[in-house]
Structures are given as structure tokens and as C-alpha cells.
Amino acid sequence: VFDWIKRGVETVTEFDTALTEMRKVSDESLSSLKNFQTESFDLADTVGTTGLQIQQSTAEFMRLGQSLTEAKESAKNASLLFNVSEFDNINDATTSLIAMSQAFDDYSQMEILDSLNKVGN
């Protein structure tokens, strides 16, 4: 029972930390970010990841100055990269996608992912 309670507290703390990170790097209202936090679970289901990973990745893209809408799409792409690559965590996939997007600024993130997929195959 204590382990179950401990895991519950850890989960709530992780989601609170993700929300705090998004608030630090965004001009969005708290209600808008909380709505996104709820929406992130549906988005995570569509790309085969967790809501927490979507939120963490979104915060990283927002830190670069992307709007919530742009960051949400970028986080989705980073999650796809994470799923099809050998990265150990979403932070590594996010950082790599950021670097590749900056290096190949003539290409969209999806074009980069498609190219990586072709090379991998």
C-alpha cells in the first residue's frame, strides 16, 4: 500500500514539474496549459507514448520560442522519432530533433524523420 501511495505522489510530482516547466517558458495562461496537459494524453495515445513525455518535450520546444501549437506538433514529431530510433529517453530524441531541425532548416521535421526512416530501413 505504501509503495502504491509513493508511486502516486511521484506521478503527481512529475506532472506538476512538467506544468511548471511549461509555465516558465511560455506566455500561455495556466488554464490553457492545464487544458493542454489533459489533451496531451490523447496525443500520446496517437503516437504511442505517454502524456508526461509529450509535456516534457513540448516544454523543450517552447523554451526555443515556439508557440504552444507549434511545440505540441514538434513534441509529437520528437515522440515519433523516439519510437522509431534507439534513443533511451524522450529528452535525447527531442534534443536530436532540435539539432537536426536547425541543421537542416530547409526541411520540415517530418521530412527529416522520413529521411531518417529511409536510412534506417
Image (tube, rainbow, N blue to C red):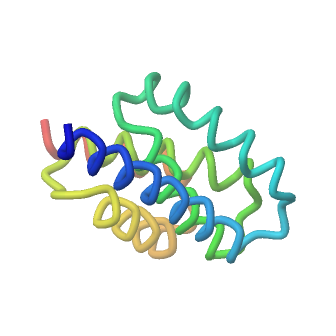
On the rendered image, what quadrant is the N terminus found in? top left
Give above or below for 72 relative to 92. above
Q: Give the residue furthest to the front.
A: 1
> Residue 94, located in which quarter of the rendered image?
bottom left
Give above or below for 112 relative to 106. above
> Residue 23, located in which quarter of the rendered image?
bottom right
Question: Residue 2 at x, y = what percent?
Answer: 20, 45
Give above or below for 67 relative to 63. above
How many numbered badges does the structure rendering display? 0
| Relative horizontal placement of residue 114, taking residue 24 as reference (left or right) | left
In the image, 80 versus 7, the foreground residue is 7
On the rendered image, what quadrant is the C terminus found in? top left
| Relative horizontal placement of residue 8, taking residue 16 as reference (left or right) | left
In the image, 105 versus 19, the foreground residue is 19
In the image, 27 versus 10, the foreground residue is 10
| Relative horizontal placement of residue 91, taking residue 56 as reference (left or right) | left
| Relative horizontal placement of residue 29, taking residue 106 as reference (left or right) | right
Identify which residue is drawn at 34% across, 28% down.
48
Question: Residue 120 at x, y = what percent?
Answer: 14, 43
Identify which residue is drawn at 62% across, 75% down.
63
Question: Residue 25 at x, y = what percent?
Answer: 69, 75
Q: Decide if residue 111 is in sight here.
A: no
Identify which residue is drawn at 49% across, 66% down.
101
Question: Residue 106 at x, y = what percent?
Answer: 57, 63
In the image, 55 versus 85, the foreground residue is 55
Give above or below for 17 relative to 84. below
Q: Decide if residue 116 is in sight here.
A: yes
Identify which residue is drawn at 53% across, 61% down.
18
